[in-house]
Amino acid sequence: MTGRPETAAAPRTGFLRRLLGPRVARVTPAEAAALSGAGALLLDVREPAEWRAGHAPGARHIPLGQLAGRLSEVPADRPVVTVCRSGARSRRAAKLLAAAGHEVHDLTGGMRAWTNAGLAVRAKGGRPGHVA
């Protein structure tokens, strides 16, 4: 993806994995959009009001606080890209999903970066949205 050292997705083993959790690849908005276009699930973990204000087209919504109890709703047969508003919640979600065995990427900068990259944001009914 980006080739930056911090994005390397080589698995951690032993002590480091137990201490730090699984390594999660971080992706740019353009990379996230490309992954989504190639079949990855874009998983938005923001709160319902944030989701209603605007989200990436085709994204699925499971708030971070509900994700642990709804892991069965996340398909294991395709990559997942996690997204929130700025990147903090999506990183936690990505680590949770990676620990559960999912191939996962975290959108660096969240929906703020997504909109700054000029990518579409939709609200209910497909009308234009905004990042709350």
Image: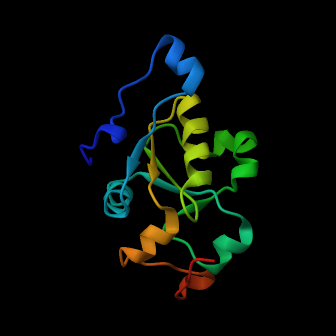
> Residue lying furthest left in this view?
3
| Residue 31, horizontal then vertical, whole percent | 32, 57
Q: How is the image coloured?
A: rainbow
Depth check, front residue: 128 or 77: 128
Q: Kindly identify the residue that appears in the image at 32 percent across and 55 percent down.
A: 38
Looking at the rendered image, the quarter that the C terminus falls into is bottom right
Residue located at (58% from left, 21% from top): 19
Q: Residue shown at 75%/49% (left/top)? A: 66
Q: Where's residue 124, x and y in %?
A: 63, 81
Q: In x, y percent, where is residue 22?
A: 51, 28
Q: Is residue 60 above or below residue 49?
A: above
Outermost residue to the bottom: 127
Residue drawn at x 50%, y 71% as measured from the top left: 112
Q: Is 51 above or below relative to 7? A: below
Residue 7, image quadrant:
top left
- The x, y position of residue 129, in whole percent, is 55, 84
Q: Is residue 128 visible?
A: yes
Q: Quadrant of residue 72?
A: top right
Rendering quarter of residue 85:
bottom right
Determine whether 57 is above or below 37 in the image.
below
Residue 57 is at least partly visible in this image? no
